[in-house]
Amino acid sequence: MKSTLFKIIGGLLLLAIGLFLGKTFFSSSGESSVPLPSTMQYRNAGLNSDTTQVAQQKEFTGQIIEVRKGESIQAAVKSANPGDLFRVYPGIYSENVYIDKDDISLQGVIIKGE
């Protein structure tokens, strides 16, 4: 009886250690986003002559502006220049955003399904 009990406890202990080590070594780091190569092409939907061909000819030439939880998207838009890209990280943003500048792109970043 004791031998069986020790085997069960030992098996559960090994399983717990395996789960801990697996999560430690094989889980992804906390934050990740899609990398942005310097030759990235993006779609500028604000142009009247916008077609797939026209949009594919435009290359990313601006800066990447990151907006994180607790920050203002509108404040980032005000500081932007044509060609900039906004990366908006997960969070609740309670504001009206008016984009009145040309060649600005917006990208939502997904972290852990959010």
Image (cartoon, rainbow, N blue to C red):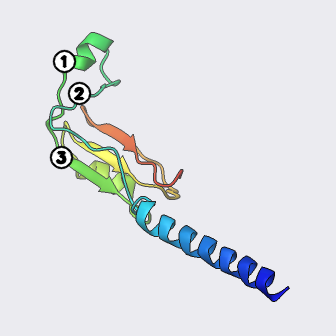
Query: Any mark on residue 48, and which?
Result: none
Looking at the picture, tell me which residue is in the foreground, 18 or 48. Answer: 18
Horizontal relation, residue 114 to residue 60: left or right = right
Q: CA distance from mark 2 to mark 3?
A: 14 Å
In the shown orientation, is residue 26 left or right of residue 13? left
Q: Amino acid at mark 1?
A: Gln
**Which residue is depicted at the point 37% across and 54% down?**
32
Front in this rendered view, residue 28 or 38: 28
Disc 1 to disc 2: CB gap under 8 Å: yes
Which amino acid does the dot numbered 3 rest on?
Gln
Q: Is 47 drawn above or below residue 93 in the view shown?
A: above
**Does 56 appear above or below 6?**
above
Q: Quadrant of residue 2?
A: bottom right
Residue 36 location (% of width, % of height) = 24, 41
**Of callouts 1 and 3, the N-terminal one:** 1
Q: How far apart are the alpha carbons under marks 1 and 3?
A: 18 Å
In the image, residue 71 sits, relative to residue 49, either above or below, namely below
Q: Earlier in the sequence, mark 2 or mark 3?
A: 2
The label shown at residue 57 is 1
Question: As drawn, is 15 to the left or to the right of 28?
Answer: right
Give residue 85's position: percent from left, percent from top. 27, 42
SS for callout 1: helix
Residue holding disc 2: 41
Q: Which residue is mark 3?
A: 63
| Residue neighbourhood size for the residue with mark 2, other residues' Cα within 10 Å, grouped as few (<14), some (14–19), many (≥20) | some
Residue lying at 18% horizontally and 43% vertically, measured from the top left? 81
Would you call the spot at circle 3 few (<14 residues within 10 Å), some (14-19), or many (20 or more)? few
Near-viewer residue (52 or 32) = 32
**What amino acid is at disc 2?**
Gln
Q: Residue at x 68, y 75 (%)?
A: 12
